[in-house]
Image (spheres, helix red, strand yellow):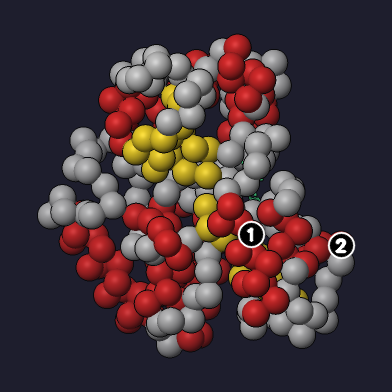
Amino acid sequence: MAGAGISTPSGIPDFRSPGSGLYSNLEQYDIPYPEAIFELGYFFVNPKPFFTLAKELYPGNYRPNSAHYFLRLLHDKGLLLRPYTQNIDGLERVAGIPPDRLVEAHGTFATATCTVCQRNFPGEDFRGDVMGDRIPRCPVCTGVVKPDIVFFGEQLPQRFLLHLTDFPMADLLFVIGTSLEVEPFASLAGAVRSSVPRVLINRELVGPFAWQQRHNDVAQLGDVVGGVEKLVELLGWKKEMQTLIQKEKEKVGRGSDPQLPPQPLRSLCWS
Ligand code: APR
């Protein structure tokens, strides 16, 4: 189970960290309250704040970090039943985890839907509009096209229902970089059998790790990259991890990253 905390080392702010989190830095968007930027009612009245934020979050501007590559290594070793992420930055895909293995519980920029005629489009079709500060319009009915990001109150993707079989089957649960504040995703932490160890890698104790601990819960508190790298070392996978990251970086260097069209290098810092 992953949240925005796995992408802060890549330069993408999370939502709730005091001061640095997205929800503490929305003054520029002129919205009534932070979560409005992800609310349909507000979006239909004024989609501009969301698309201004989308320009910053759009896949292609950031690179995965060790936390993403740890998930990729688990996948390569056939140990990863299924990554459930709340993140919309697409960095799990960029790290090489096949999209059909992923559950992107809060949606993705990879696809988009017209809010009027409901036609689906590849998200890539509207990158130019978003980067050019234009509201994406449906080529058929000219309705506003919204990336398939799950807004508050919207249904989660059908794939989220895979948890009904995955979590009872899991024999180990990682919870990485999330406040476990948002339902129904947060409740997944309690969906594994009581005999299954749950490992939290996060700055602070969250959710059931804070208020309903189990005897076999483990918490590695502190920076997510440091925590993951410590675990990788203990597992004896340090060399494999370094080789994987080097190989992926060379791919990007050759501009042949299958997940991303060649992108002008942009500042990795949050503007
Ligand atoms: N190392 C370790 N922990 C970190 C790091 C880091 N570098 N950066 C952030 N964290 C922790 C924070 O301390 C916090 O506990 O990650 C967690 C991030 O929590 P949120 O900002 O609430 O992000 P997330 O849990 O993903 O939010 C869930 O809320 O608004 C919605 O749809 C949005 O998917 C999002 C959902």
Q: Earlier in the sequence, mark 1 or mark 2?
A: 1
Q: Closest to the observer: 131 or 64? A: 131
- Residue at mark 1: C-beta within 8 A of ligand 1: no
Q: Closest to the observer: 265 or 106?
A: 106
Left or right: 245 in relation to 182 = left
Type of the residue with mark 1: Leu
Of tags 1 and 2, the one toward the viewer is 1
* Rendered image quadrant of residue 169: bottom right
Q: Which residue does the numbered mark 1 point to in the structure image?
A: 161
Q: Is residue 192 left or right of residue 265?
A: right
Residue 136 in the image: state x and y as whole percent: 39, 20
Amino acid at dot 2? Trp
Q: Quadrant of residue 97?
A: bottom left
CA gap between label 1 and label 2 equals 26 Å
Q: Which residue is mark 2?
A: 211
The answer to which of 237 and 161 lies nearer the viewer is: 161
What secondary structure is found at the residue carrying circle 1? Answer: helix
Q: Residue at x 43, y 81 (%)?
A: 78
Crowd class of label 1 (few under 14; some 14 to 19; many from 20; radius 10 Å): few
Horizontal relation, residue 20 to residue 205: left or right = left
Give the quarter of the image for residue 110.
Answer: top left
Residue 210, labelled with which disc?
none
Q: Residue at x 63, y 78 (%)?
A: 170
Disc 2 crowd rating (10 Å Cα; few below 14, some 14-19, many 20+) is few
Q: Please, is residue 202 above or below residue 29 in the view?
A: below
Count of marks placed on residues: 2
Q: Is residue 5 above or below residue 77?
A: above
Q: On screen, 212 above or below 204?
A: below
Q: Quadrant of the C terminus?
A: top left
Judged from this view, the residue extending furthest toward the bottom is 236
